[in-house]
Amino acid sequence: MNAMFGALGVASSGMSTYKTWLDAIADNIANVNTVRSTAEEAYRSKYVVAQSVEGSGFGAQARIGKGTTVANVVENDPEGIITYAPDHPLADENGLVRMPNVDMGEQMTSMIIAQRAYQMNVTVFERARDSYLRALEIGK
């Protein structure tokens, strides 16, 4: 990536990473009440693992980061939570069903963090773009 446009690339990679995190959170929230029979696996909540993209080159250039990327999307325990719901159509002979192990409070907190981080990257992208456009105006 050209050093001049590095801020655009870093902000763009941040937006991409946080979009993936928001997508995982949306899946988790959408499936918070997904019920399965005890013979099936529960919905597996997803967690995004991000990592920094290291710079290339030598000396100071090698220490300048190039943004972030999604290293992995990890799925939670398939066991879920066994819940007593004898009237549920998927309940086994003991009246038990399997619910996902999704903490709604944790998901909402993560969503706020990811939304704000995404917005910060949008702001950086816009400011860098505006600066580059103003620099081009100087040459006119």
Image: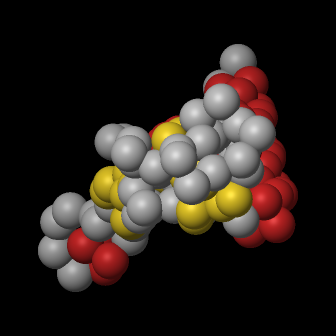
**What kind of colouring is applied to the model shown?**
secondary structure
| Residue in the foreground of this view, choosing between 27 and 138 | 27
Residue 95 horizontal/vertical position (percent): 63, 51
Outermost residue, top direction?
Answer: 140
Residue 2 versus residue 69 in the image, above or below: above
Does residue 3 appear to the left or right of 86 in the view shown? left
Q: In which quarter of the image is residue 68?
A: bottom left
**Residue located 43% across and 61% down the image:** 79
Residue nearer the viewer, 127 or 39: 39
Question: Left of 75 or right of it: where is 35?
Answer: right
> Horizontal placement of 16 versus 134: left or right?
left
Residue at the image position 71 percent from the left and 47 percent from the top = 86
Residue 26 picture quarter: top right
Q: Is residue 79 above or below residue 89?
A: below
Would you say residue 8 is visible in this rendering?
A: no
Q: Can residue 16 be seen in this view?
A: yes
Total count of labels: 0
Pick the residue in front: 139 or 21: 21
Residue 131 screen position, x and y as percent: 73, 41
Q: In this view, does 88 lie above or below 82?
A: above
Q: Which residue is drawn at 73% across and 50% down?
A: 85
Outermost residue, front direction?
93
The C terminus sits in image quarter: top right
- Residue 60: x %, y % from top left: 31, 79
Residue 110 in picture, x, y percent from top left: 72, 62
Q: Given the current orientation, which residue lies at the most extreme bottom position?
A: 59
Which of these two is toward me, 107 or 57? 107
Of the 4 image quadrants, the one containing the N terminus is top left
